[in-house]
Image: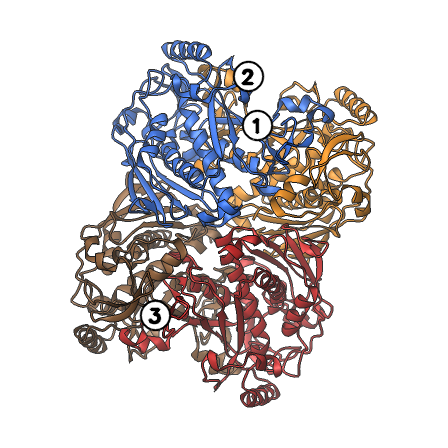
Chain colours: A red, B brown, C blue, D orange
Amino acid sequence: MSNRFGRRFVVSTWGESHGPGIGVVIDGCPAGVRWDEDYIAARLARRRPGQSRLTTRRDETDRPQLQSGVFEGYTTGTPIALWIPNADARPQDYEHLRDIYRPSHADYTYEAKYGRRDHAGGGRSSARETAARVAAGAVAELFLQQIGSGIRCRAWVEAVEDLRLTCSWEQIDFEAIDANEVRCPDPALAQRMATRILEARKAGDTLGGVVAGVITGLPAGLGEPVFDKLHARLGYALLGINAAKGFEYGSGFAGTRLRGSVHNDPYYADEAGRIRTRTNHSGGVQGGISTGEALDFRVAFKPVATLLRPQESVNRQGESVIVEGRGRHDPCVLPRAVPIVEAMAALVLADFVLLRLGNRLADWANR
Amino acid sequence: MSNRFGRRFVVSTWGESHGPGIGVVIDGCPAGVRWDEDYIAARLARRRPGQSRLTTRRDETDRPQLQSGVFEGYTTGTPIALWIPNADARPQDYEHLRDIYRPSHADYTYEAKYGRRDHAGGGRSSARETAARVAAGAVAELFLQQIGSGIRCRAWVEAVEDLRLTCSWEQIDFEAIDANEVRCPDPALAQRMATRILEARKAGDTLGGVVAGVITGLPAGLGEPVFDKLHARLGYALLGINAAKGFEYGSGFAGTRLRGSVHNDPYYADEAGRIRTRTNHSGGVQGGISTGEALDFRVAFKPVATLLRPQESVNRQGESVIVEGRGRHDPCVLPRAVPIVEAMAALVLADFVLLRLGNRLADWANR
Amino acid sequence: MSNRFGRRFVVSTWGESHGPGIGVVIDGCPAGVRWDEDYIAARLARRRPGQSRLTTRRDETDRPQLQSGVFEGYTTGTPIALWIPNADARPQDYEHLRDIYRPSHADYTYEAKYGRRDHAGGGRSSARETAARVAAGAVAELFLQQIGSGIRCRAWVEAVEDLRLTCSWEQIDFEAIDANEVRCPDPALAQRMATRILEARKAGDTLGGVVAGVITGLPAGLGEPVFDKLHARLGYALLGINAAKGFEYGSGFAGTRLRGSVHNDPYYADEAGRIRTRTNHSGGVQGGISTGEALDFRVAFKPVATLLRPQESVNRQGESVIVEGRGRHDPCVLPRAVPIVEAMAALVLADFVLLRLGNRLADWANR
Amino acid sequence: MSNRFGRRFVVSTWGESHGPGIGVVIDGCPAGVRWDEDYIAARLARRRPGQSRLTTRRDETDRPQLQSGVFEGYTTGTPIALWIPNADARPQDYEHLRDIYRPSHADYTYEAKYGRRDHAGGGRSSARETAARVAAGAVAELFLQQIGSGIRCRAWVEAVEDLRLTCSWEQIDFEAIDANEVRCPDPALAQRMATRILEARKAGDTLGGVVAGVITGLPAGLGEPVFDKLHARLGYALLGINAAKGFEYGSGFAGTRLRGSVHNDPYYADEAGRIRTRTNHSGGVQGGISTGEALDFRVAFKPVATLLRPQESVNRQGESVIVEGRGRHDPCVLPRAVPIVEAMAALVLADFVLLRLGNRLADWANR
């Protein structure tokens, strides 16, 4: 069950980092979505390894093969399967790790759970699995766009180590995000972040940081009470991304220092008669259900666990060993985490929209 | 679906704040758990309104009635239903709010979603629903205890507004948590927190804060890869608690400022040959699966939305109104949030244990 | 999980035959359904024990208590819980069965599964649990009626032992079903069935039979392909009723003897341009999805396992024992099975309708 | 959701009859199952088109490609994906059916549901999808075998049209089933059935029939009470096979004519002290849970809907048309239904076993 996400827009993924490839099947995407292969490829290109000097040099084109669910250019309502072959897998590079548990990787825990593991690049625990999520998220985005929902999630790098963007999301030029290799919308800060990442790599070290995001275009009334609150499902989705360590939305942890008289968001009716809030400490969610304001959030990512320097560890027999630092790896996961965050958010939103709509596209217009 | 939580230890809750009561049914609790009504009552007493001068004066005994699933002192494997009558409901107190949306409550969003709402005390959106969670969590705790798992979650108030406990969980005296009405294990700090809460109440205002917790006794190998990572399910569960704004575990947001060479947790084998980590920035989870170290986490809670002072808002017609400040409410949710956090953690853990065990108690001994 | 049914209109039941009562919570019923307590009570009255000389003499009024989910006469979208107290429980009557496995009951199998059991009247395995289903089914019917779906399921007793009604469903006067205590729409046959049942009771024996039913008012396009075919979910639901031994729909087992050239249902367009089939061997379902024609089906029920005569069996120690024949029991379950069949069908249909509609009532009008 | 089956051993399928291929991913298969490609291929060969003169002449080798979940010869606990390319797809053969609804196929209903459809060979509604089920079922069988469960399902053709095998399952030589092309264990009857099928084909007509099966090796205590009874899940699974019209188990419909005094299965303890029943009208299930006796069942299959003769129908515009009879099709689905029935049964059983066991292979030995 753990390889499946969603209640109505359901994705199941499979595949290992150095096996034949990565796959995903989407069950529940309504019929009538116009297929846009280029859009999906473009979304995947943002996650692709080897896209810049800041990322791993593994070379994957990540062009997915469509196996089902689309007929004459439109989705049919039946499962959509996408298969992304691994073109540059090198399982033999990991032979020296067969019996060794790399620190802060999933090697030991997978073995504790399953009694065996695929040691090549972490097998299933590798972030290569997220290619499937980005592909599925792109389909969710096509759905959200084509029904005219206006719902859109945008994410960006807010912090790398202690370098931090401090403006609010309203001040961000979304067009600037992809204008640099870091995906931080402040070009000067992005430059400093890039320099920092390259320095860390040179030192054989790695960095963590924060991805921020905002979901706009939400109607009021999306989400479910009690356990499946909109933000709880979003947090669940984002905490499931490799290396995620925390999630907050709206005022978040900082908001715990405000008094209720400051934190509460007063209602007013705008000129069009639409009910709005003057502030948005709520992050667009009250009681787990959307208010119609923007849902802003932040996700913490730890520094990458693979270091290009020797580390102490143990092998399967519990003997002390030195893990050598070699291979192809990202010194900082943040730039490539941005499209993954957006994809998971799109999956969450498509799911909630379908819970509300059933599976008929035409309904959205009448909402 | 939104009123159900869990995959194997499944709880469903119902009931409104000012209706006849709150109920919960647990489907999936194995047979053979010794029923302990006093234990459950004691857990509920920690969440009970009216327990101290810091909480709402609503007077509920919260003694649950057992409706099914237990026979001659032991669970039978069939659903366990508990019903907690509302003894001190006063729906008439909310008549003036019938057409008004209280700021930062779920009034407007429920109406946007459902087209109607129970305006008495927020109906289903009230935190009174969490009584059901604490009752179910107590049953999960009985299960975890009686199989000898050693798994236990303890939580405490780490911060109220800017008053913050800064020690690590290893330094905490768990016995001290319940020794004061705030549930902060540092008595001096707890005293200052209590004073702050009473001051805020006097000013008609409210406070937020942070609940921290730690899960100990975890075996290695608990959790599921990809979407249902142990921490992702835990975050999902805790973000679903009323007023929660953020979740982090292990090194959390602060860990994003560490380099990989510092953040990585080196493995070693202890004297008994058990594989351990020297540090635990991982928070006891790697690749979504437990390492066997402690899982420490923090949850942010916003200040309570109900103020004892007038606030601007709108009514159903979009007209400006003043929401009067009156009624029985907590000035700070933190002391009562502690048992709710523990309960949700217990539900998550019982669920993962059953995924691993199937539903036979005897198996645990052979793990 | 086994005590829950449905994907969108989700019911969870609890309670034992001789415990405090039987409960059900419905999660997923849309807001805005007008509550009709009398309707629900009337549906329950058809299943009620003691309703005629053909049924058990246990005396239950089965008037459910509403615990949540309805506000000022309408459902709110939050869980609807109903509690049906057991007024005439007599657990002490079963003391002699504490260590004995009654033939063809669930005594032995529950104990094999759970290691313990509630021996009073079968505990959870008793058909008393179906009171909860009928209550929930009545709510599903209110939903299906009030959205103007036109979908309706009617069932009747087709056979008792070898006494069999041979006409097709189109020839049945639905008003005649409840006009007699057997619920067979042919009064003369019903009379013979009643006589047969009373004879069997007098002989300390029991009878089985067949309940037939038809779902009318189905739109084309309801159901899901592959595993969740409309008839597969219906069969699943009906096979889960106590004592059910078989299910068939449309031409059923008899249809296996027809050739394709006879069995195929030719399409035509009726005067209104609606696409219809000239015959309906398909039972209103093709490829798992409704055609818009009626869905007719049959369910086999075995003879009641409790006999008023001594039977050979074993006790917990494997020793031969004689099970005495005494207590209050139905000699034939068929008349009371009719409302249970209808209720389960309503639950299946409400679920499929919501999968299609999402949870907004207004949508149905635009379908 | 409709393309997914199972709760713990979860299969999701995708693919269309004349698209690139058919796929399946299994989520929940425990680690440590020894991979046996030949076994899986052998199971698929029994379902393969073109296997005898009685089946369609479409030529598919149906050799699945393993995409994930197996490492160095053993399952790893992560998803197992299998991809079966369509080697002999001919979508152009269906161009004349683009606007036509074939009688008793899913053409019209898919279009009513989704607003569009893949008209090539029925697209997703084709029984070609069952190749994925047989592949997954083979993996379930490997699991059930390797844990030493002893659980096994065997099926055979009991009836073709009115030609019927009348012996009980105990009298059947299971080795004889695959000894002929019909898969009826009585060679003389199989010969008559084959002749009948060839006659029907020559007449451009098709036949239906009954597949019977028996599950042996069941421990007592498998299954879940109330909605997920063992036979209800089995019926659900088998009714979801293309062309299925009915399901019965144990005494089935015929058992409704027996009196309780005859139908009840008396318990006794055998020489080994194991509790058994003298008769088995229960079909190995009481109260939804296995008794340890064999579970025998029957599934009705309608005659194939594709005829090699002209038929009346309508097109998308509601105009009368003649559907031409041509293409490659089975005159009788029964011989190829046998492995599909066995596969679905294996999926149901692996699922129940895992519900009971959790996901650790070693546990089974301690049951």
- Residue C38: image quadrant is top left
Q: Which mark is residue A268?
A: 3
Q: Determine the CA span between mark 2 and mark 3.
A: 65 Å
D362 shown above or below B67: below
Residue type at mark 1: give it.
Glu
Q: In the drawing, does residue B138 fall left or right of residue D277?
A: left
Q: How many marks?
A: 3
Q: Residue at x 54, y 75 (%)?
A: A313
Mark in the foreground, 2 or 1:
2
Q: Are marks 2 and 1 on the same chain?
A: yes
Residue type at mark 3: give it.
Tyr
Q: Which mark is residue C167?
A: 2
Look at the numbered disc 3 and give the secondary structure of its residue. strand
Q: Are marks 2 and 1 in contact (CB under 8 Å)?
A: no
Q: Determine the CA span between mark 2 and mark 1.
A: 16 Å
Look at the numbered disc 1 and give the secondary structure of its residue. strand
Mark in the foreground, 2 or 3:
3
Q: In the drawing, does residue C182 fall left or right of residue A152?
A: left
Q: Which mark is residue C248?
A: 1
D134 shown above or below B246: above
- How far across and how far down the image is residue D93, in percent? 82, 43
Q: Chain of mark 2?
A: C
